Structure formats: C-alpha cells, structure tokens
Image (spheres, grey):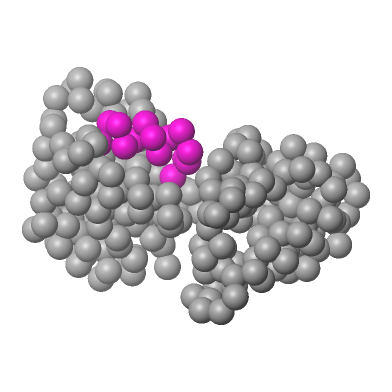
C-alpha cells in the first residue's frame, strides 16, 4: 500500500484528504506543521508528499528544500498561493506538480495515480543499488564487493540495503528491527548489533558507522541505480 504524507495545518482539509486517500487505497499520514512533517519524513518511508506552503514553524518551501537534500520522493504542492511567482518557485525546488486551492479531489487523485505510476516504472527499471565499491542486486538478493560476491544472509542483505537507501540518516535499533524484521521487537535489540557485526566482517570496509547510544548509519553518498 502506498504511503502518502499530507502536510497541511487545516484540520478540515486534513480530514477530507485522509478520507479520500484511504478510499482510493492509499495509506495517509497527516502532519500539522513543518517540524512535525520533517520528523515523520525522517522516521518513515513515503511514496508521495502533499505539501502546503503556508505552515506553522516551517513553511512549505523550507520543507521542500530539506526533503530534496535527502530524497527524490514525489511532491505535490497543494496551496492557496496561486501567483506565477509562487508556482515557479515551487518548481525551482523540484516539485512534481502544483495545485491551487480550491481543488478538485478527483483530479488530485488522478494526478497522484499518474505520478505513482511513473515512479513505479522508474523503480521497475532499477535493479542494482550501488554504494562506493558495493553493489546490491535487488532481484537476485546478492551483494558484491569489487565484483566479488558476498555471502550474506537475507537479513544481512536487507539490513545493508536499508542503511544504503537511508544513507546520511541515523537509524535506531528499533527502527531497523521494524523495517528489517517487520515487527515491533519487544526483546533484546542486540540482535541488530550481532547482524551489524557480521556485516562488517564480511564487507571488510569501514562503511557502517556506530552512533553511540542511538544506532547506525552510512556516510551519505547518493546511490546510483541502474
């Protein structure tokens, strides 16, 4: 199910958007201000963002700039600002579409579907994730270092993939448990430490950094997909 982040401070608009998106088969999450939105974005994976401009704490342009420094997730600006200057500014921040209020819900849903179809096609064409001298074949579930295959377990592969796809972000042990093991783990989080230790031995490169008391990350280098 596609995850959509709604960044909108008007409760009525939030409620309407969430209801229609759920009915259309999406999973919406709503943020009421800029700081909350960035927090949600950094802790979750979203397939598309609906972004207002006039927001408390951090405006839509600032949010867009921060997101674009970390992700190419599709962004639709949904705002009452309808001047050409505002629209051009939005596209300068590499948004995917600009819709002014009041807006048509059916047209918005069509635009969302069209953008997600395009990104799905782009992802279908992306079979290999590259990071420095590591390559991850996402179809064959194989990893290689300088062309030499690494004997990774499924969990080790998933853990490495998660770190590379979120490079520059510190992922806590609980986040990694949720994303890689797919459940909320209530026991000993050292299972993550054990897998990281095994990964480091197999990679033999100092790529995975420990952030003491928090979790793990890899240095931010934009991964190439081919």
- Classified by dominant secondary structure, the portion drawn in magenta counts as helix
Q: Position of residue 171 (x, y in %)?
A: 54, 54
Q: Quadrant of residue 134?
A: top right
Q: Is residue 88 above or below residue 223?
A: above
222 to the left or right of 186: right
Using the image as rendered, state which of residue 169 and residue 225 is in the foreground.
Answer: 169
Outermost residue to the right: 148
Q: Residue furthest top?
A: 85
Judge left or right: residue 4 versus residue 102. Answer: right
Say which quadrant the C terminus sits in. top right
- Residue 7 in view, yes or no: yes
Magenta-drawn stretch contains 65: yes
Q: Residue furthest bottom?
A: 187
Asked if 92 appears above or below 203 in the picture, the reply is above
Task: Specify whether residue 150 is painted magenta.
Answer: no
**Residue at 51% in and 79% down:** 186
Q: 76 or 59: nearer the eye?
A: 59
Q: Residue at x 39, y 60 (%)?
A: 3
Q: Report which quarter residue 99 is drawn in.
A: top left
- How many marks are shown on the rendered structure? 0
Question: Which quarter of the image is occupied by the N terminus?
Answer: bottom left
Magenta segment boundaries in residue numbering: 60-73
């Amino acid at each position: 199910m596609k995850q959509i982040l709604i960044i909108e401070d008007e409760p009525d608009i939030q409620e309407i958007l969430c209801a229609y998106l759920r009915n259309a088969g999406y999973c919406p999450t709503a943020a009421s201000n800029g700081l909350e939105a960035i927090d949600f974005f950094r802790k979750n994976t979203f397939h598309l963002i609906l972004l207002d401009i006039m927001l408390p704490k951090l405006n839509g342009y600032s949010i867009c700039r921060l997101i674009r420094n970390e992700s190419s997730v599709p962004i639709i600006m949904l705002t009452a600002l309808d001047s050409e200057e505002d629209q051009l500014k939005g596209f300068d921040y590499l948004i995917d579409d600009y819709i002014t209020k009041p807006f048509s819900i059916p047209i918005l849903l069509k635009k969302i579907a069209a953008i997600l179809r395009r990104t799905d096609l782009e992802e279908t064409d992306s079979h290999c994730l590259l990071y420095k001298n590591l390559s991850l074949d996402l179809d064959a579930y194989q990893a290689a270092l300088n062309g030499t295959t690494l004997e990774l377990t499924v969990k080790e592969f998933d853990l490495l993939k998660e770190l590379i796809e979120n490079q520059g972000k510190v992922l806590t042990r609980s986040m990694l448990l949720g994303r890689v093991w797919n459940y909320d783990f209530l026991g000993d989080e050292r299972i993550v430490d054990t897998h990281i230790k095994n990964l480091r031995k197999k990679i033999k490169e100092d790529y995975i950094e420990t952030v003491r008391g928090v979790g793990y990350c890899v240095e931010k280098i934009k991964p190439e997909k081919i």
